[in-house]
Image (cartoon, rainbow, N blue to C red):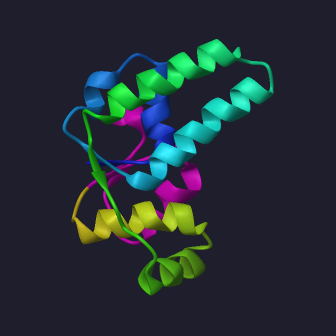
Amino acid sequence: MIFDASSVYKAIETGIIEKLANEKTLDLSLYELGNVVWKNVSRKNLSSEEGIELVNFLSEVLSLMDILTIGIKSDVLEMAIKNNLSYYDASYLYASISFTDILVSEDKKLLGAASKCGIESYSIENI
């Protein structure tokens, strides 16, 4: 299964990290997750120390997963345009198609696009 950043974060938030072990995510998710932590620190939802601890924990969790690199591809852009998705989200869709794998996301729009493309997809609660 290929997990997007929203599902990785939800797995951590809800204590179901075991669902991530030996699964896949994109290298993009590392930056997306780092940005989530930064936003929480900048909005004072987390202290700097808590943010640093969370980033370190994220690093440990992500080390349990295979990190895929898609890069910049015209196919991803075409998929983004066709499905009215960000390039980021289309990258997860493209990876699921390329690796013939299930997509796991908490993003309803991305799940809808996956369904439209014939890709098996779920939110983390449903796997």
Location of residue 38 with respect to 45 vertically, above or below:
below
Which residues make up the magenta segment? 102-127
Q: How many marks?
A: 0
Q: Position of residue 5 (x, y in %)?
A: 48, 43
- The answer to whether residue 120 is magenta is yes
Residue 95 appears left or right of 38 = left
Task: Name which quarter of the figure residue 21 lies in.
Answer: top left
Q: Position of residue 10 (x, y in %)?
A: 48, 29
Q: Position of residue 19 (x, y in %)?
A: 27, 29
The residue sitting at the right extreme is: 43
Query: Which residue is at 63% across, 36% downward?
Result: 36
Q: Nearer the viewer, residue 5 or 39?
A: 39
Query: Which residue is at 34% across, 62% downward?
Result: 69
Work out whether residue 115 can be spotted.
no
Task: Name which quarter of the figure residue 102 lies in.
Answer: bottom left
Residue 51 appears left or right of 92 = right
Work out whether residue 76 can be spotted.
yes
- The answer to whether residue 56 is magenta is no
Query: Which residue is at 30% across, 69% downward?
Result: 97
Query: Which residue is at 51% across, 84% downward?
Result: 78
